[in-house]
Amino acid sequence: MQQYLEVGYALSNRVRCTGCFQTIVKNEIRFGHVFVAPGFGYDKKHWYHLTCLKFMPKGDRNQDVALINIHGLRTEDQKKVHDRIEFIKKNNGKKLMKECKLLEKQDDQCEYIKADKDIFSTFIKHMKHKERKDLGEF
């Protein structure tokens, strides 16, 4: 699936930010992550406030996704966008490491809970089997 990033000014007050679910005000900078779905006839867009953008999406082969329409912004707004992208790229690695550690802990807990449930379900099956055997159903 193709994807690209689009930046521009909000044309109206009808779009909500995917990050904070608040309305993006008209003429405010908005940042869009666009998915091109071939064969469907439309593009799926996720719009963000510039400050709500927390990650830079990667392409199919982990390459950077193209950024379009940045030259349609005023020069000071272009600088804001470039600064935000650099901030995200610089801090994204640290955040990902924290998230990975958290996910590892959650995976360990899930494995523990899963093993605990397996032991319990095996015990219940064994008890039911033993009850049937004691009742002479076998």
Image: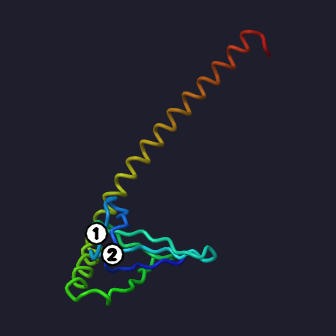
Asked if the residues shown at circle 1 and circle 2 are in contact, with their CB atoms under 8 angstroms apart, the answer is yes
SS at circle 2? loop
Counting other residues with Cα less than 10 Å from the Cα at mark 2, is it few (<14), some (14-19), or many (20 or more)? some
Determine whether 6 is above or below 131 in the image: below
What residue is at 54 percent from the left and 27 percent from the top? 120
What residue is at 26 percent from the left and 80 percent from the top? 81
Image position of 107 (left or right of 30)? right
SS at circle 1? loop
Image position of 62 (left or right of 18)? right
- The residue beneath circle 1 is 25
- The residue beneath circle 2 is 10
Give the image quarter of residue 12.
Answer: bottom left
- Of residues 100 and 133, the one nearer the viewer is 100
- Of residues 14 and 86, the one nearer the viewer is 14
The quadrant the N terminus occupies is bottom right
Q: Could you tell me the amino acid type at mark 1? A: Val
